[in-house]
Image: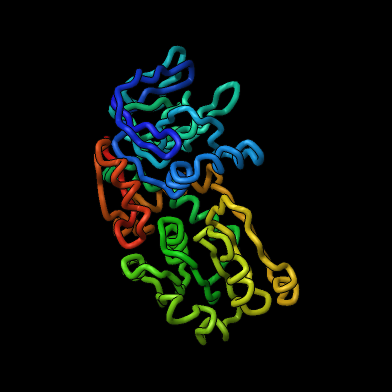
Amino acid sequence: MRAALMERGSIRVETVDDPVPQAGEVLVRTRACGICGSDLHAARHTDEFVRTSLEAGGAFKLTTFDPVVLGHEFCAEVIDFGPNTEATHGIGDLVCSVPMLRRAEALPVGYSPEAPGGFGEYMVLSESLLRAVPSGTPARLAALTEPMAVGLHAVNRAGVEPGDVCVVVGAGPVGLAVLANLRAAGIEGVIVSEFSAMRRQLANRLKAGTTVDPQEQSPFELADFRNARRTVVFDCVGVPGMLDQIFLGARRHTTVVVVGVCLEVDHARPLIAVNKELTVQYVLGYSLDEFDQTLELIADGTLDVEPIVTHEVGLDGVADAFDALAAPDAYGKVVVCP
């Protein structure tokens, strides 16, 4: 098969062996796969990504410097079954899946040489984790189930309720996923803070209440935030110093939810958070129930994900897309269609 391989930040398209499904596994053809911020981190900061993965473990980890086929946000078509596999899905069915292979040692799809991801023509998936895509749902939108489930999990962990005022810091794919889920949960007047004019535009398409350029105005100075019954801030940036800025800007008793992944050593002053009695919640991934719920919400239109996708590319366009995504004003969500 043809696949886009990543090795220490370099991406090249090569022909590699087709993956072979084992017992309980299914061979699928990739129909659409989103480029995730974690993919960009893995490419730009491979050494840090590998080191941190080895130290901390977790569901999504890159523990090798060997070439890997990235891509864990996908929709695929069933084309064959491994030996002794009970087929609960038919040939030609569109499916999504939690990006994990259930083997003796679980393998993260898209972060292991043994489990190539969606930036290749074919993948092997665990049949027990497959989820049927509801009829009529476009593959490019169903592929957003995984990242949107991350947003749903963050919103659930924050315990938001109607009447809360929420600030989303950063309107990249993670921030937009959080925003879309807040709106789906009935949260009005979400404030989005983002330097990029293009990303603020995407946030407006998702019906953010207010978008601000933090170079011109702090979201924490807005009257809606200062006067709210309860305030929640979602850090969707993951850059050094951001948590400290949020601690400084947030009012007393704010809940801070850390969704963006910072791979570098960060410094935040706990005394600021202590003095304000802030609640800081770190989040990771999602549950199987949240994954299933997200797919249904996308299928019935409750989660408005269409505005997030700004570009579609083939395998030969993956390297250029990774380069372009380094500039926040270039692309929104990029979907790869092998």
> Quick check: 52 left or right of 147?
right
Q: Is residue 93 visible?
A: no
The image quadrant where one finds the C terminus is top left
Residue appearing at x 53%, y 30% in the figure? 64
Q: What's the colour scheme? A: rainbow
Q: Residue at x 63, y 38 (%)?
A: 57
Is 90 above or below relative to 258?
above
Q: Is residue 272 left or right of residue 105?
A: right
Tell me residue 251's x, y (percent). Answer: 63, 79
Nearer to me, 157 or 243: 243
Q: 295 or 266, which is in the foreground?
A: 266
Using residue 210 as the reference point, say whether residue 272 is left or right of it: right
Query: Where residue 176 appears, x then y in whole percent?
Result: 41, 61
| Relative depth, front residue between 126 and 244 | 244
- Residue 96 in the figure: left or right of residue 48: left
Residue 24, given in percent of the width and then of the height, sits at 48, 20
Q: The N terminus is located in which quarter?
A: top left
Give the x, y percent position of residue 39.
44, 43
User: In which quadrant of the rendered view does residue 132 lie?
Assistant: top left
Name the residue located 39 percent from the left edge and 72 percent from the top edge: 208
Residue 178 in sight here: yes
Residue pictured at 45% horizontal, 76% vertical: 214
- Looking at this view, name the residue that lies furthest to the top: 83
Above or below — where is 276 with respect to 58? below
